[in-house]
Amino acid sequence: MTRKHKPFPLLENVTIEAVAAEGKCVAHVNDMAVFVPFVVPGDVVDLQIRKKKHKYCEAEAVRIIERSPLRTRPMCDHFGICGGCKWQNLRYEEQLKAKQQQVYDQLSRIGKVELPEFMPILGSQKISEYRNKLEFGCANKRWYTKEEIAQMPPREEGGEGNLNEPAIGFHITGAFDKIYPISKCHLMDDLHNQIRNEIRDYTLAHHFTYYDIRQQVGLLRDMVFRNSNTGEWMLILQFHYDEPGDDEKAQQLLAHIAEKFPQLTSILYVDNQKGNDTFGDLDLTLYKGTDHIFETMEELRFKVGPKSFYQTNTDQAYHLYCLARNFAGLTGSELVYDLYTGTGTIANFVARKARKVIGIEYVPEAIEDAKINSQINHIDNTLFYAGDMKDILTDEFVARHGRPDVIITDPPRAGMHPDVVNVILNAAPQRVVYVSCNPATQARDLALMDAQYRVARVQPVDMFPHTPHVENVVLLEKRQ
């Protein structure tokens, strides 16, 4: 006989106190921390506990008694369901305050290093349509809200209505095999909405199968949109061919989209038979136009291919790179190492103010783009190497290429491998500019370097409005 769990209590008339981690807010009830999504500080709400742990619990706001003056109207009809922009209901100036505090808390609590006064966070010039890349999944089963299920007519044999409607949109946390359909996303220029909705209408009208991740069958699988500040647009469609006629159907869809949307300067596709949607190790087929688009920054042009990493907020990327260049304090005589260089954007951006720049990146295709970007811009003082950072950047590498005067590092969210940190310490550059998309792992790495480097400047940058994510740039100077 299974034990019945007592129902979780309803907490009434609770005041939300502050922004917390992962886009949630926090309140305290009887000395218990309660984390709640989709509310803002100052809200007075009734909370239904959904999960209870020893020291905290997670809850859902089931009734708003009093609305906080910090609230604003979300711009998106999908807010609260999609989960991608958890702070749309919080005024933008309050979002910036929360991100500034987040950086300070993580650097001080995790890093435990001496910190200078922070510069005010650099807000994004655009808070909608700021992204240059979005990816949408396709699934044979869409995700429904409780309200939608409740409104469905019952089937003759009982139960809810048909729950197998296909969808194009975003994955829902906790439902890996289902997609929540998106009709309009405000994070990118509206053209992508028009194209995505046309793909939906065409494929449904022509009886395309949508991908079933459990059974790994279904023709339409995934799509990626990229655009640039030069006005170019790229569409990457992922298919999963199951039957002999699938390639012909895919070609018909590609022809329809290419004819209807001449704005697309690059259309590529791939038959992905893998168990996941990544295509970095697959060969893409070019259907129309070029296999790349260009971004511009100052007088530079950067080639961006379908597998290239490029900062997804183009306007803010420029300000971020200006900060990195400024923090580096280049006079023209320095040897610079650019770690995790990607397509060489930072390396090429700073090259004209340095004697030489050496960039290292894991993805070989990105390094090829980095070399091409140097050629396009007539930059001849860069070198690029592809491989795992901890394997490439060694004491022998430094001895062969020279000790850097400045290191710029922009690692992934996991931060730097301890071996990489040790090589940096052994190389002993005068300055390290650490660009991070995760201040928590940045703080951990700063602590590892604290004996030899002091934190001289800290500049948070908001690259992703309406989300809890924040970039942070730190200047480290060698202790004398």
Image (cartoon, grey):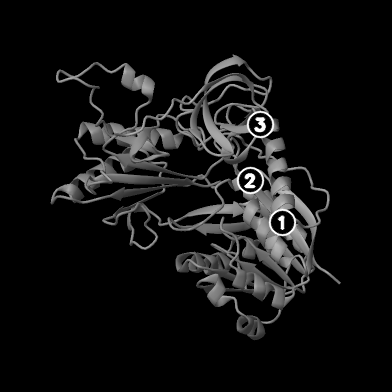
Q: Say the numbered circle drawn on residue 111.
A: 1
Mark 3 and mark 2: Cα distance apart in space: 30 Å
Split into 4 quadrants, where in the image is the N terminus? top left
In three-dimensional space, the C-alpha distance between marks 2 and 1, rounded to whole angstroms, equals 17 Å
Looking at the rendered image, the disc whose residue lies closer to the viewer, 2 or 1, is 1
Dot 2 falls on a residue whose secondary structure is loop
Q: Residue at x 55, y 39 (%)?
A: 54
Residue linked to disc 2: 470
Q: Is residue 416 above or below residue 297?
A: below
User: Identity of the amino acid at label 2?
Assistant: Val
Reading the image, the residue beneath label 3 is: 31
Question: Along the polypeptide, which appears first: circle 3 or circle 2?
Answer: 3
Q: What amino acid type is highlighted by mark number 1?
A: Gly
Q: Earlier in the sequence, mark 1 or mark 3?
A: 3
Q: How many marks on residues?
A: 3
Residue 329 seen by the camera: no
